[in-house]
Image (tube, grey):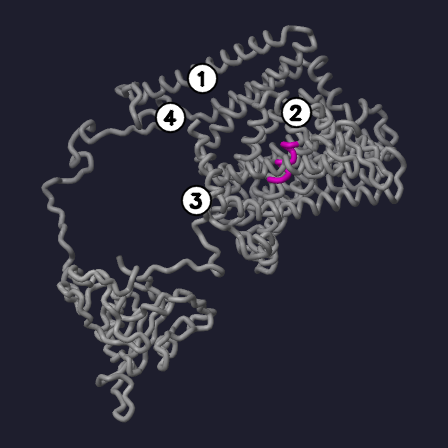
Amino acid sequence: MTAVDTLVLAVDPLLSGDLDPGIVGIVLLKVMVAFTLLLVSVMLMIWFERKLVADMHNRIGPAVAGPFGILQTLADGIKLFFKEDLIPDRSDRVVFKLAPYLSLVPAFLVFAIVPIGGDFSSGDGVVTWFGERTYLQVADPPVGVLFFLALSSIAVYGVMLAGWSSGSKYPLLGSVRASAQMISYEAALGLAIATVFLTSGSLSTHDIVASQVTGNWNVLTTGVVPFLVFLVAGTAELNRPPFDLVEAEQELVGGFHTEYSSLRFALFFLAEFMNVITMSAIAVTLFLGGPAGPILTDTLGWVWPVVWFGLKVFAFLFCFVWLRATLPRLRYDQLMDLGWKVLIPVALGWFLLIGAMGVADDRGWPVVLVVLVGMAVMAGGAALLIGAVSKARAERLADAFPEYDDSPTPGGLL
Amino acid sequence: MGYFRGFAVTFRKMFEKRVTTSYPADKRPKPARLHGRHVLNRYEDGMEKCIGCELCAGVCPARCIYVRGADNPLDEPVSPGERYGFVYEINYLRCIHCDLCVEACPTEAITESKLFEFSFTNRSDAVYTKDELVVDVSTGQPRHLPWEDWRPGDDEMTSGWMRATSSSGDASYSGRVSWSGELGHGVRAPEVGQLDPGTDTDPEGSVGT
Amino acid sequence: MDATVFLISAAIVLVGALGVLVARNPVHAALFLVQTLFGVAVLFVLQDATFLAAVQVIVYAGAVVILFLFVIMLLGVDRAEDLGVEPIVGQRPLAAVIGASLLGLLLTLLLVATDGPTGALGQTAPLGDGADNTRRLGEALFTDYVFAVELTALLLTVAVVGAVVLARTVKGALQPLPVVVVATAEELPGTTEERFGVDSDTEIDTAFPESIEGGDA
C-alpha cells in the first residue's frame, strides 16, 4: 500500500484489502449517490424554504410547477439555463468565469466526509453491500474536520473573486463584506469545533460519530455553549439571514453576484444551498451523534441510521428557514461586535474550560473545583478587560467633551 | 426572553389561514369600484354614446387617450348627436386608471370595467382602439379579449352608475336617476348613498355602503 | 502512483510559482500563489503529513492570501504595474545577483551534495502514520518545544499591539469614539439664526411663482 492509500482511504474496511473492480464500483457508487443526493436535496431545500417562508408569511408560495409546486426549483433551473450569459465589459473575464466554480466545488467536497449512515451502536458504522463491508461516507480522512474547515475557508474565494472580477462597485462592496464576515466567523466556528475535538479525541468524522454512540451526544458533553456558537457562526459563514449583509438588497443590489446571470448565477445559488445542507450535516455529525438512533427492524437495518440522520438534518434546515423568516438583518457593526466581542471570547473561554476539565480528569483533581476556579479566573479576566476598555473610553470622552454629563440619558453615549 | 417572542410569532403564523389566493386558479371578488380597463358604452338603441368631444383626452393626466371626432354621416349616424368619436385610442402603458376621463365625460360614454388583466408582447398591442373598447352592438357586453380571464360579474357595473361623484355634479341630489340608459343594462338604479334618507329600499344590495 | 501524484503536483506548484512571477495583475498573482499552496498541500499529503496539509490550506490559502486580496481590493491597486519604473534604485540588479546565488546554492545541494534526484521518498522515516500525526505534532509542540511556541505567541502578540499603535495616527489629543449627542435647541449656544447664519430680517418668499399659480386651467 502506498502512502496515498493509507491516508485518503484511511481505515474504511472496504479499502484495506486489494483493489478489485467491485470495490472500485462501490466507491464510484458512493460518489454518485453523494453527488445526486446533494443535488436533489438542494432542489427540495429551495422548494421547502420558499414554501415554509410563505407559510410563515401567510402566503401560499410556489404552487404551479408539479404537486404543491415541488418542481419549482427545476423550472427555475431550466429557465436560468436558457438565459443569456452576460459578461460585463469591465470584468476580469478569466476570474469572472472561474469564481462560480470556486464556490461550487468546496460545497460538493465537504459532503464527502459526512457519514450519512451505518450502525454505530453495534457494528462500528460498517454496512455490508454486495458482500463488501464499507462506511456510508465517501471518504474518511484522518483530518476530516480540518478538511471541512479548509474547504469552508476556500469557499470565500468564490464570493470574493466574483465581486472583484465583476468590475463594478456593488459587487466589490459585497465581496469585501463577505470576506471580512467569513474570516471573522471562521475563528469562532473553529474554536467551537475544537471543543468537539477535545471530547471526542479525534479529527475524523467517523471517529467523532463513533464516540457519541451511547447517547452522550457532543451537544451535551461539550455543554451546549459550543453548539450554540457553532450554529450562530455557521449561519454567518453561510451568509444566510440574519447575517446576509453580503447580498443586502437594499444596499448592494445583489451583492457579489449582481453582475452574474444565467448558469453562473445558478451555480452560486446551488453552492449557497448546498452549503446550508452540508453545514447542517456537519452540525449533526459533530454535535448530534450523526446517524445514531434506534434500529427498529432487522431487515434493511442499515436504512434506519440514514433515516435518523435525515431527520436531524431536516430539523436544522427548518431552523435555518425559521431564522430567515423571523430575524431582520444585522447592522454591519453589530455583526462585527457579535463575532469578535461575543462569540470568539465565549468560544475560546469554553474551549479552555473543557481543556481544564480534561486535565483535571487525567490528574484526578476534583473537576467541580477546577471548573469553578476556571470560571472565576475567566470572569475576572473578562471583568478586567471590560473595565479597562470602558475606562479608556470614558477618559477619551472626558478629553473630547469636558462639559459632557456622564449620567445616562437617552440618545447620549452610544 | 423578548428575543424569542418573534420566533413564536412566525411559528404560529404557519398554521393560520392564508391571506393570498392561488391567483390564476382562484380569483378574489373585486371591490365594487375597482378601476379596470375602459369600455365605450352604447345607448339602449345601439347608438354609441361618445360624441368625440375630447374632454377625456384633455383631462387625462397621463396623456394616454387619443380622440378624433367626425361629423355623423346623415344616412347612417353612429351617435345620436352631431359628431361621433371617429378615432378612440387608449395607451395602457401610460394609463394610471384614475378615472378622471369617466368623470369628465358629458355623455357617460367612457367608463371602467373590473377587467384588469393586460398582457402584451409588443408596445403597439398596448394601445386599445375602438375595436377593443366599444361594447358589443348586440349584447352590450365589453369585448372579451383573448388574454382576459373573465369571472362572473367582471363585466358588470361598467356604466356611469359607478361614478364617484353625484350625478351631474348636483350635491343635493337624492334618489333621482339622471343618467342615460345603456345597451344591455337599461337604466341603472341609484346607489345607496344617493338614496333619499326617507326611503330605505336598497336597489343594488351590498354595493357602496 | 506516488511518482504520478508527485509529478502532477510538482507541475502545479511550478506553474503557480511562475505565474506569481509573471502575472502583471496582483490579483492574478495571488491566485497563482493559491495554486502553489494547494500543490504544496498535496505534496504534504503525499508525505503523510495530513495535518500540515490541512493547516497549509486553512492558514495560507484561507487566511493569508485572503488578506492579501482584501488589501488589494480595498486599496484599489488591482491594475497592472508599469514595469518601466524602478521604485528603488539598484534593486533589480541586486535581486538578480541574489536570485542567481540562491539558485546556484540549491542546485549545488541537489546535484553535488546528494546523489541527485531519484524520485524516491525522503530517507527520514515518517513520524507515525497519517492518522496520528496530529497527535504527534501536538505533543511535540506542547511538551518539548513549548517554550518556543509560547515565545512565538508572545512575539505575535507584540506584533499585533505594534501594528495597532502604528496604525493609530494621533493628532493632538486622542480622537474620541463616535458619539451621538442629541441636544434640544435651548441647550445650544446662540439663536438659530446665528448658528445657521441666517439673517432673520430677510423675508423668505413663500408665495407660489406666478407661472404655477396663474397657470392655465
How far apart marks 1 and 2 lie (CA) works out to 34 Å
Label 2 residue SS: loop
Q: Is residue B135 magenta?
A: no
Camera-near label (4 vs 2) is: 2
Q: Earlier in the sequence, mark 1 or mark 3?
A: 3
- The reply to whether callout 1 and callout 2 are in contact (CB within 8 Å) is no
**x, y percent for residue A33:** 74, 45
Please, what is the three-letter code of the amino acid marked with disc 4? Leu
Q: Position of residue A90 (x, y in %)?
A: 53, 53
Instruction: Give the residues drawn in magenta, as a range.
Output: A276-284
Hey, which quadrant is residue A22 in on the image? Answer: top right
Label ID, residue A251 = 3
Q: For the residue labelled by badge 1, is the local secondary structure a helix, a strand or a loop? A: helix
Of mark 1 and mark 2, the one earlier in the sequence is: 2
The secondary structure type at the circle numbered 4 is loop
Which residue sits at x=62%, y=51%?
A: A97
Count residues near mark 4 (Cα–Cα under 10 Å), then give few for <14, some for 14-19, many for 20+. few
Name the main secondary structure of what is drawn in magenta: helix
Q: Which residue is mark 4?
A: C177
Query: Which residue shows up at 44% across the image and 26% down it?
Result: B1
Q: Report the residue at 37% width, 75% height from top.
A: B141
> Which residue in the protein does label 2 denote?
A217
